[in-house]
Image (cartoon, helix red, strand yellow):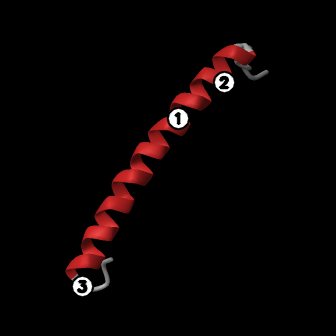
Amino acid sequence: MTHTDLTFITNEEKKAKLTGELYKQFEESHRLETAIRKNLEMLGYGE
């Protein structure tokens, strides 16, 4: 017999967690875009 984790997360908790993760991904996306644009400019492909 195996142990099953029966921890339940409410919809509000799940939404809060997912929203927090999404905002972190937005921040990372912005950071990466800025770095890519800077590198492209250094290569002569910038705006």
Q: Is residue 41 visible?
A: yes
Residue labelled with disc 2? 15
Q: Is residue 35 above or below residue 27?
A: below
Q: Residue at x 41, y 44 (%)?
A: 27
For disc 1, the neighbor class at 10 Å (few under 14, some 14 to 19, many from 20) is few
In the image shown, does 37 or 25 lie closer to the viewer? 37
Any part of residue 9 in sight:
no
Image height of 24 relative to 40, above or below? above
Callout 2, which amino acid? Lys
Q: Secondary structure at mark 3?
A: loop
Q: Is residue 33 left or right of residue 25?
A: left
Instruction: Identify the mark at residue 21; answer none if there is no mark.
Output: 1
The span from disc 1 to disc 2 (Cα, nearest Å) is 10 Å
Q: Taking 24 as reference, is 41 left or right?
A: left
Q: For mark 3, does the 10 Å Cα neighbourhood hold few (<14), some (14 to 19), or many (20 or more) residues? A: few
Three-letter code, disc 3: Leu
Q: Position of residue 25 (x, y in %)?
A: 48, 44
Q: Please, is residue 9 above or below residue 19 in the view?
A: above
How many marks the image carries: the answer is 3
